[in-house]
Image (cartoon, rainbow, N blue to C red):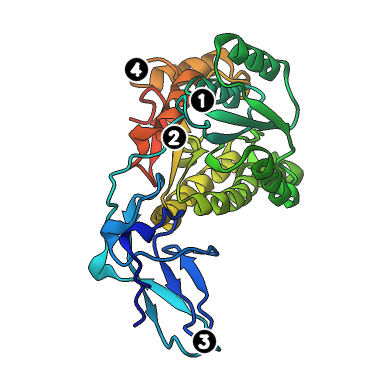
Amino acid sequence: MFQPERLPEDACPTIGPTIFAFRRWRQTGKFQIFAKTAQLSAGTYACRSLEHVVAPPRVTEIVRLTFQGSAHDERQTPRFYPDKMVRRRSVIERKAPMPATATEAPRNVLVTGASRGLGLGITRKLSRAGYQVIAVARNKSKEVTEAIAEAARDGDIQPQFVPFDLGMVEAIPELIKKLRKEFGPLYGLVNNAAAGHDGALAMMHNSKIEDLVRLNTLSPIVLTKYVVRSMMSEGAGRIVNIASIIGFTGYSGLSAYAATKAAMIGFTRSLAREVGRLGINANAVAPGFLDTDMTHGLAGEQKQRVIRRSALKRLADIEDVANAVAFLLGDGGRNITGTVLTIDAGATA
């Protein structure tokens, strides 16, 4: 077992998202620091005592790592594991990252499908809450332009619009690379963009089914993959996937759509277990029927049936869902992950 290099107390630096640096090979004297799961290259030394570590803002737990294997064998790939006997909470109690104060830069949140409806409502809410919203949609709508002007008029942080067709899954890696270069690290991701083709499955054209699966399921999964890589390097992040109550209740004429939303719920719960140890929260919000472009096609009597079925005898609105998203991104959601928050006025009660 190879222990960390011992240094004087005043020589211990503030280190990044990882905790301890270990001497990789005794012969070369090179140092490399390792996160709990991700290996990140950096040139810093280790502190022997946990009490000497200055915890960075996004670290919620300090873990001592121990070297397993021979430190003299150049051919062996070094492997590091958490030493569970000395796992403990961070020396400095930290809360979840919050929107910017006057002395720090605003946190970047990527919102997809932000040109209208629910995505636009979430964009407006997060902008007012102090986040730097990166609004992604295929085209810049009149409503987005108005929202940017409204934010400037009210003294809020102006959303930044980035045109992108999320159906072009193969271009997503380059998109995230571009956003990181232009805006910096991504703290939040709201996967909201979705298609809403309806109709009996037996009569639905295959191209429409492919569009639903590509935009509602494949695209957000791939987008999350590359955003999570950015969050890993920061040691923190929040992911909110917009699902639907249709994903677990079903609805006649929406079988293909329901399949894509059920997939996002399963994806959210499994992802939460994968990335939780890295300080990343993943949750889903499942709205019921809302007053958006996707539900305007409901006939009057059909809409009334939905209202009568809800416990509160009304429909939830866009602001309700936007508030839930802001809650999960903020301090109130720091210990919430892997859950599905239903916003449906009690329709599924």
Circle 4: element type: loop
Task: Give coordinates of residue 288: x percent, y percent.
Answer: 47, 27
Task: Please state if 313 lies on the left or on the right of 145 as rendered.
Answer: left
Which residue does the numbered mark 4 point to in the structure image?
312
> Of residues 142 and 149, which is closer to you in this image?
149
Q: Is 271 situated above or below 193? A: below
Residue for point 41% across, 86% down: 69
Closer to us: mark 3 or mark 1? 3
Are there few (<14), some (14-19), or many (20+) residues within 10 Å of tag 3?
few
211 relative to 2 in the view: left or right: right
Question: How dense is the environment of label 2, judged by Cα within 10 Å: few (below 14), some, or many (20 and up)?
Answer: many
Closer to the N terminus: mark 1 or mark 4?
Answer: 1
Q: Which of the image's four quarters has the C terminus?
A: top left
Say which label, 2 or 4, has the lower sequence index: 4
The residue pinned by badge 1 equals 126
Q: CA distance from mark 2 to mark 4?
A: 26 Å
Which residue is depicted at the point 52% across and 53% down?
233
Q: Nearer the viewer, mark 2 or mark 4?
A: 2
Residue occupying the point 53% across, 32% down: 105
Kind of residue indicated by mark 1 = Leu
Distance from the alpha carbon under mark 1 to that under mark 2: 9 Å
Circle 2: residue type: Leu
Residue 48, compared with residue 237, is above or below; it is below
Which disc is residue 76 wearing? Answer: 3
Amino acid type at image mark 4: Leu
Measure the alpha-carbon separation of dots 1 and 4.
Answer: 27 Å
Q: Mark 1 and 2 residues: CB-CB less than 8 Å, in contact?
A: yes
Q: Which residue is mark 2?
A: 329
Q: Secondary structure at mark 3?
A: loop
Q: Are marks 2 and 3 in contact (CB under 8 Å)?
A: no
Front residue of this view, candidates 302 and 246? 246
Circle nearer the N terminus (1, 2):
1
